[in-house]
Image (tube, coloured by chain):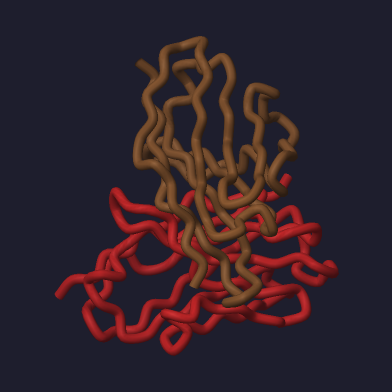
Amino acid sequence: QITLKESGPALVKPTQTLTLTCTFSGFSLNTSGVGVGWIRQPPGKALEWLALIYWDDDKRYSPSLKSRLTVTKDTSKNQVVLTMTNMDPVDTATYHCAYNPPTGYNYDYWGQGTLVTVSS
Amino acid sequence: SFVLTQTPSVSVVPGQTATITCGGNDIGSHSVHWYQQKPGQAPILVVYDDTDRPSGIPERFSGSNYGNTATLTISGVEAGDEADYFCHVWDNGSDQGVFGGGTKVTVL
């Protein structure tokens, strides 16, 4: 059974750096083709794709946010970490991580998400 | 970058068919995935690669994709189908994932 869970601060101040951790089970990021993606959703708004990291450490980022995002993995801990710099109130959102199977770009399983509020 | 356009809302009577569209330039050349999201919950994949259903998803959910429009069809709509639905593709041109704006399905 595949599960993912996001963790991190619920509140950050403007200009601070956000660090979120996705802890997963039921699959390995050592498996060929597997990936973990990050998606966010501002309150009442649509999903926004942020980043994707693959088993071989290949990474993809949203072009509009690429300068602010870093995604890394720790396969020994079954964790993926997303870092976003220079946080702004418009970055207030629920941040989800999700499992990307080897067969395509769909997200088969999602974490429940963690709400991050950016406010001074 | 690639833009996916969804009708903001659709209303349907129980037992009838809900049709949710996702428009994009030559979206037919992309693999489209659909997610259902109920309030306060994480999205659930209901259709992937245009037409395939994950295990556990009822046959009432079906998808198609041709030309500039992908479609998610919910046949015999039930009250429990009331949710937001998002389409999703991988855009090779910009090398990123893209989501549509979402469609709220209301069961009358």
Q: In the figure, B34 relative to B74: above or below?
A: below
What residue appears at the point 38 percent right and 53 percent down from the top-left corner? A46
Report the number of numbered marks.
Answer: 0
Q: In the figure, what tint was chain B given? A: brown
Out of B69 and A92, give the one closest to the viewer.
B69
Q: Please, which residue is most extreme toward the front here?
A: B67
Expressed as whole percent of the image width and height from the top left, the position of residue A89 reads 22, 71
User: Which quadrant would the C terminus of chain A be assigned to in this image?
Assistant: bottom left
Question: Does residue B50 appear to the left or right of A72 in the view shown?
Answer: right
Q: Please, which residue is most extreme toward the left here?
A: A120
Expressed as whole percent of the image width and height from the top left, the position of residue B102 reads 42, 46
Q: Please, which residue is most extreme toward the bottom here?
A: A67
Residue B103 location, quadrant: top left
Residue B73 location, quadrant: top right
Expressed as whole percent of the image width and height from the top left, the position of residue A34 reads 76, 65
What residue appears at the point 48 percent right and 40 percent down from the top-left corner? B85
Q: In the figure, B103 relative to B108: above or below?
A: below
Residue A59 location, quadrant: bottom right
Question: Does residue B45 appear to the left or right of B8 in the view shown?
Answer: right
What residue appears at the point 27 percent right and 74 percent down from the top-left corner? A12
Question: Does residue A33 appear to the left or right of A60 in the view shown?
Answer: right
Q: In the figure, B78 relative to A110: above or below?
A: above
Q: Please, which residue is most extreme toward the right here?
A: A32
Q: In the figure, B69 relative to B79: above or below?
A: below
What residue appears at the point 38 percent right and 77 percent down from the top-left corner? A18
Chain coloured red in the rendered structure? A
